[in-house]
């Protein structure tokens, strides 16, 4: 943990407004080794046949507001970033990993059927009978009427109250690239391989704003490519099976989530809709 300048958010606030925390995890990697390989030697390298996921760095910047009376400033600002994830799979290592996972012993399954005595004790009463019992004990209708009146009073709150919504959390996450390269073995059960297929996702971005009455979520994907290395085009390029057609983002998803307990539920931008989701595809 170290306090320092936030390098992900483009923020110009004075640190007298926020308490900064920076968390960074470096050299996160995933290796599958054969018996004759030493992990102590390979873990120092950034690239080897044993690396299924090459070393990555995760950066997380957290800002905690100290001006709790200012509704325009979020209580928490969190931003995270991963530069890229490089994943390389060959048949030998992948099948070895799957075989290893299958060998892991799992706990015995729990008994599905409860004992007979327990079933007999849990006899379900009819809904009507339960309601009659509760109504005899408490003035249910009166309570429901009072709750309805309280709800109607809340709905009458002026639209200007939307300005008083507290920004509780502002979140931003950026993953620049994910590359998954699949390599085919030239000899059975060996590390002698050649490129076969590559899946690539570019610029994955997630933004969120959590306020008193709603949550706004935005997700975008710049591009998704599938490249087949066995085939070539007329201009001697590897065959691009799938990718976006224009330079605009491949996928954009926008969400506005709220509930009918929101006093501004009937007004703009909610219009009495709990979950609004917009999807744009290039």
Image: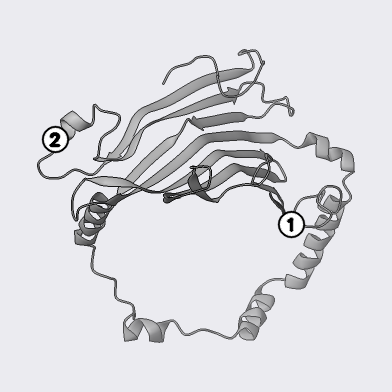
Could you say which quadrant of the image residue 136 lies in?
bottom right
Could you say which quadrant of the image residue 101 lies in?
bottom left
Q: Is residue 165 left or right of residue 51?
A: right
User: Of 281 and 146, which appears nearest the observer?
Assistant: 281
Q: Is residue 117 above or below residue 5?
A: below
- Label placed on residue 274: 1
Circle 2 sits on which residue? 38
Q: Earlier in the sequence, mark 1 or mark 2?
A: 2
Q: Residue furthest left?
A: 36
- Label placed on residue 4: none
Question: For the residues marked 1 and 2, what is the alpha-carbon distance in whole angstroms?
Answer: 55 Å
Give the residue at x 67% y 21%: 67
Could you say which quadrant of the image residue 130 lies in?
bottom right
Q: Is residue 160 above or below residue 133?
A: above
User: Of 124 and 107, which appears nearest the observer?
Assistant: 107
Picture coordinates of residue 13, whole percent (x, y): 66, 16
């Amino acid at each position: 943990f170290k306090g320092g300048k936030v390098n992900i958010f483009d923020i110009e606030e004075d640190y007298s407004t926020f308490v900064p925390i920076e968390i960074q995890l470096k050299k996160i990697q995933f290796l599958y080794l054969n018996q004759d390989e030493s992990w102590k030697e390979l873990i120092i390298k950034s690239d080897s046949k044993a690396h299924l996921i090459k070393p990555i760095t995760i950066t997380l910047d957290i800002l905690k507001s100290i001006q709790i009376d200012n509704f325009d400033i979020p209580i928490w600002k969190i931003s995270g970033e991963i530069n890229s994830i490089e994943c390389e799979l060959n048949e030998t290592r992948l099948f070895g990993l799957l075989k290893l996972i299958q060998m892991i012993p799992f706990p015995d399954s729990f008994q599905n059927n409860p004992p007979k005595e327990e079933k007999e004790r849990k006899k379900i009463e009819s809904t009507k009978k339960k309601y009659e019992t509760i109504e005899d004990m408490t003035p249910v209708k009166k309570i429901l009427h009072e709750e309805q009146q309280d709800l109607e009073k809340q709905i009458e709150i002026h639209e200007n109250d939307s300005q008083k919504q507290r920004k509780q959390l502002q979140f931003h996450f950026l993953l620049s690239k994910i590359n998954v390269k699949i390599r085919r073995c030239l000899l059975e059960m060996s590390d002698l391989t050649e490129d076969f297929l590559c899946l690539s996702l570019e610029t994955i971005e997630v933004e969120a704003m959590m306020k008193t009455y709603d949550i706004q979520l935005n997700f975008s994907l710049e591009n998704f490519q599938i490249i087949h290395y066995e085939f070539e085009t007329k201009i001697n390029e590897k065959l691009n099976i799938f990718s976006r057609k224009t330079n605009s983002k491949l996928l954009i998803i926008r969400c506005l989530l709220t509930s009918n307990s929101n006093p501004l539920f009937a007004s703009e931008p909610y219009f009495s809709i709990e979950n609004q989701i917009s999807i744009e595809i290039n």
